[in-house]
Image (cartoon, rainbow, N blue to C red):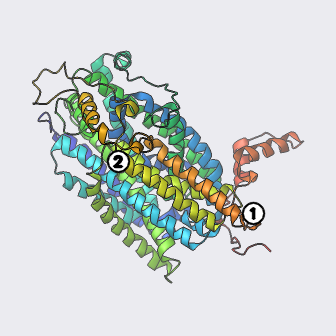
Amino acid sequence: MSSGPSFSVWDYVVFTLMLVVSAGVGVFYAFAGGGQSSSADFLVGGRSMTAVPVALSLTASFMSAITILGTPVEVYQYGAIFVLICFSFVLMVVVSSEIFLPIFYRLGITSTYEYLEMRYNKVIRLFGTVLFIIQTVLYTGLVIYAPALALNQVTGIDLWGAVMSTGVVCTLYCTLGGLKAVVWTDVFQVGIMLAGLLAVIVQSVLLQGGISTIISDSAQGGRLNLWDFDPNPLRRHTFWSITIGGTFLWTSVYGINQAQVQRYISCKSLFHAKMALYINLVSLLVISLCSVFCGLCLYSIYKNCDPWTAQKVSAQDQLMPYLVLDILSEYPGLPGLFVAAAYSGTLSTVSSSVNALAAVTITDLMRPYFSLSERQLSWASKGTSVLYGAVCIGMAGLASLMGGMLQAAISIVGVVGGPLLGLFSLGILFPCANTKGGLAGLLSGLVLSLWVCIGAQIYPQQPENSRPLPLTTHGCNFSLAPGGTNWTANMNDFILKENLQRPFLADNWYSLSYLYFGPLGTVTVIAVGLIISILSGGRQMVLQPGLTLSKEDLTCYKAYNVFKEKLSGRSGKLDLVRELEKSFGKTNLAFCDVELSTQTLP
């Protein structure tokens, strides 16, 4: 760890203020409006939320400290091609809002896995629930560990003390305030995340003499490698792997993940839920572009003296905190603001995960099997929040054994999220899909994804596929520790020595880009599921209405009907927003007196 500047009193004040406000929101919603008197209040905010706070909460849920700390390092090491992930955000929002959101909202479910029982059977519902719990606990452990690492680097605070404090604060306001507290703290934390990134960008631009200098340095260093259309799926990052793989990855997060779907169904109408997704797109793009530009700033400042090669930091994920202390230590409070930004990302993601884990546990594992009153379910929801908070803190220990934050996080989401996305897509898009096909597809997709992911961990990609860019230390004004040299060369030498021991699959199947882990699972589930379903008589199956996608669910079809009605002779001024809202209506069955029939059609 660097022995340079450390936190000042004002940094601690800024950082502590963020924690106090976050906890305060939880306390407020614990008592506001009569408190969390029912499980519906606690888990889905009484289904009364509006678009803007839900949109910002959607962004905060998965724009974690991994984005704040990991994305700039990704750009620093591999170039700005990762900015193409913005294209996948656009595609993801369209797919999620048009295909998945109408189904979940119409059914009025609390847990997305309720749909799996309606569409398939109880066994597949339990299987999906368990997979989600495993995925979320692993991912959340990584998310807790990331900012703790940042705090350890910049302040010297005990690493595991920081891990504990993260988990405790999250669990506090989750347990006290439920989903409303989570959503409104997310709104506050998105602002802090953006402020922390902008502080780094503004000071970097001032130090380097303008944006043009940063862009010029990045271009000379090969960091503006934006357009690479190589179709080779073994290449770590290309236009195709990022846009296609990223779309599948983020659709598995925003289309079917409980943490996000829980926010859609908390909205007071389907129109508000869809608007929340599209507003969320704007904030996603802003934070992603800022984090990528931070990576270019990082390279511009350290282009001649890489702190990791020079052994000023012990891990690449500490580069951003190192930069912050290097350029912002003269301004009391700003280093604290950046660490608060990283910490905010963690709090928002962990709180969303804990609340989602509580929802699926109550809805899928307790309510169907135990006869509990609403008051008992409300207390059980709070109890499971505390339990999962403790479990996620424990999983942070496992996260410390993983590699780079960004790739590790995406791999975890892709390996489990891909097959689950395939299972939901199979049920929603293909009426002929049956239980046998769904289960066979899910198992096949999961096995295939796990196989390639575990193989990739054992046999990392070779440089010709991962293509790390060179980093140098010739401009350092201090002597390097023994062995301090270009890390890229060290990696190349190591891999060349290991070449003879690598099996055939290592440089082919196991070298598949980590961004394709999700699509591999999704496509496998759909393909196997369709084949098995058709062979086992799926075409003769009759489904209850509302479980598959119809043209009436599509926004473009509703807009077409609105225009058609206006053009066919109805007088009056066309207000498309108002007409669409009428068309969508409150289609969530939680607002209706009529329940969907669970009987099959004759």
Task: Decide which of tag 2 and tag 1 comes sooner along the chain.
Answer: 2
Q: Is residue 474 above or below residue 150?
A: above
Mark number displayed over residue 539: 1
- Camera-side residue of 439 and 33: 439
Q: Quadrant of the C terminus?
A: bottom right
Quarter-wise, where is residue 104 in the image? bottom right
Q: Residue at horizontal 28%, vertical 33%?
A: 496
Q: Against 281, is 433 above or below?
A: below
Q: Is residue 509 left or right of residue 278?
A: left
Which residue in the protein does label 2 denote?
Answer: 457
Which element carries disc 2, helix, strand or loop?
A: helix
| Residue type highlighted by circle 1 | Arg
Which class describes the residues within 10 Å of circle 2: few (<14), some (14-19), or many (20+)?
some
Number of the label disc, if any, that sits on residue 109: none
* Callout 1: SS: helix
Residue 197 in view of the camera: yes
Instruction: Give the amino acid at mark 2.
Output: Gln
Q: Is residue 37 visible?
A: no
Q: Residue 120's x, y, as percent? A: 62, 68
Q: Position of residue 527 (x, y in %)?
A: 62, 53
* Cβ–Cβ under 8 Å for marks 2 and 1: no
- Considering only vertical position in the picture, is 446 above or below 211? below
Nearer-the-camera pick, 506 or 574: 506
Q: Residue at x 56, y 53 (%)?
A: 524
